[in-house]
Amino acid sequence: MKLSLKGILAAGLFAAVPMALAQDAATDVKKGAEKTGHETKVVAKDTAKGTEKAADKTGHATKVAAKDTAKGTETAAKKTGSAVKTGAEDTGHEMKKAGDKIDDKPKPQ
């Protein structure tokens, strides 16, 4: 009977070891999952901050570019308006000169 009791105890111990190891593995997996979840959350926050900063910088650059474009357009419009005015004045002056020349000619009777 001593042999069979020793055999039963040995079998019980051999059966208990894999169960204990399985519980340790499950605990390790759970801890790993929790760490992964935490790191994922941290990375997501950092990514969101980086995206927000990039959007702010892009918005600022767009605003600056729009101001520069508006200034350039205004300058071009002023120059164009000045050139049109000068051209109109020159044309009017030439037309007046032509009219004066016509008036200087003797009229047929």
Image: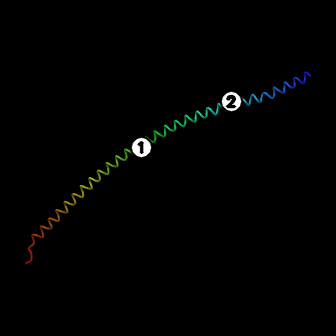
Identify the residue under disc 2. 27
Question: Where on the picture, by quarter, is residue 20?
Answer: top right
> On the picture, is 12 further left or further right than 100?
right
> On the picture, is 9 further left or further right than 23?
right
Where does the image place residue 50, in percent across and percent down from the top left? 49, 38
Where does the image place residue 41, in percent across and percent down from the top left? 56, 35
> On the picture, is 66 further left or further right than 29?
left
Question: Where on the picture, by quarter, is residue 15?
Answer: top right
For the N terminus, give its image quadrant: top right
35 over 1 or under it: above or below: below
Q: Residue at x 64, y 32 (%)?
A: 32
Q: Residue 59 — which label?
A: 1
Q: Residue 44 — which label?
A: none
Where does the image place residue 109, in percent across and percent down from the top left? 7, 78
Front in this rendered view, residue 102 or 67: 67
Q: Are marks 2 and 1 in contact (CB under 8 Å)?
A: no
